[in-house]
Amino acid sequence: MAMSSRVRRPLRARSARSATSAPIWAAVLVSAARTIGVDFDPALPHRLIGRTFTDCRALIAAAHDDRYPVDALMAGWHAAYDAIVEREGVALKPGAIDLVEWLAAEGIARAVATSTRRARALVKLEHAALARHMHAIVGGDEVAFGKPAPDIFLATASRLGVAPARCVVIEDSTAGVAGAQAAGMAAIMVPDLVPPDAALRATGVLVVETLAQARAHLAALPR
């Protein structure tokens, strides 16, 4: 890992979700269920946002009986989604490149903590031309407990060599915000599919609509 000696307030940029993957994978999941001939609650993907592969599987299994083909669904879901990424690339959230370039210019360390398994995350980050800009990347398969547990955020801070209290997390999911807060980190939420509920807002998390607004907040932080 290479870090700039000018780093003053490290920021962890959250996962491949700087790319607009959530709406795509949610639609692909419903389609994968249809392909293998089973029903699927279209509201369930909202509960899977920000969760690891293991947690997603457990949540899907818990929502159905023992005969439900969970593994076939997961395999079809990932195969279809990977094909889309390979064919079409990854669409970035507006402002993602500007944010990363600004962080680099400011000498601020950058990392990704994603619930996606590391190998899959690297493919998406490389497609989006973001991997080379990160000082650390931690996948959901590299920690014991996924979000909303703090494990992945603490692991990422450790790889950066930075105290958790010196990190800021940009998140798009309720589980991710909860994990960042549990790790003792400041969080900025840029919602994707699901807006923050009253309970999440009550934690005091900063919620903004765009990455540009998140960048403006970061620029105003004391160094």
Image (cartoon, helix red, strand yellow):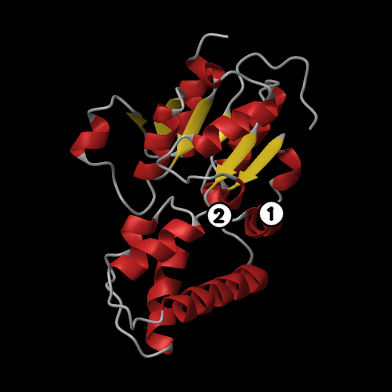
Image quadrant in which you'd find residue 117? bottom right
Rendered location of residue 138, percent (x, y): 63, 43
Q: What label does residue 161 carry, if any? A: none
Rendered location of residue 19, percent (x, y): 55, 52
Q: Is 70 above or below relative to 126?
A: below
Q: Around disc 2, counting alpha carbons within 10 Å, would you say few (fewer than 14), some (14 to 19), or many (20 or more)?
A: many
Rendered location of residue 33, percent (x, y): 39, 81
Image quadrant in which you'd find residue 156? top right
Q: Is 135 above or below relative to 24?
A: above
- Identify the residue shown where x is 35% and y is 81%: 68
Q: Provide the residue designation for mark 1.
A: 122
Separation of residues labelled 1 and 2 (CA atoms): 9 Å
Comparing 133 with 159, the one in front is: 159
Q: Provide the residue designation for mark 2.
A: 116
Comparing 190 with 184, the one in front is: 184
Kind of residue at badge 1: Leu
Residue 24 visible, this orientation = yes
- Identify the residue shown where x is 40% and y is 29%: 182
- Identify the residue shown where x is 58% and y is 18%: 163
Quadrant position of the N terminus in the picture: top right
**Furthest-top residue in this view:** 222
Image quadrant in which you'd find residue 70? bottom left
- Identify the residue shown where x is 43% and y is 50%: 50
Comparing 139 with 6, the one in front is: 139
Is 74 left or right of 156, judged from the image as shown? left
Q: Is 77 above or below relative to 162?
A: below
Is 48 left or right of 90, judged from the image as shown? left
Kind of residue at badge 2: Thr
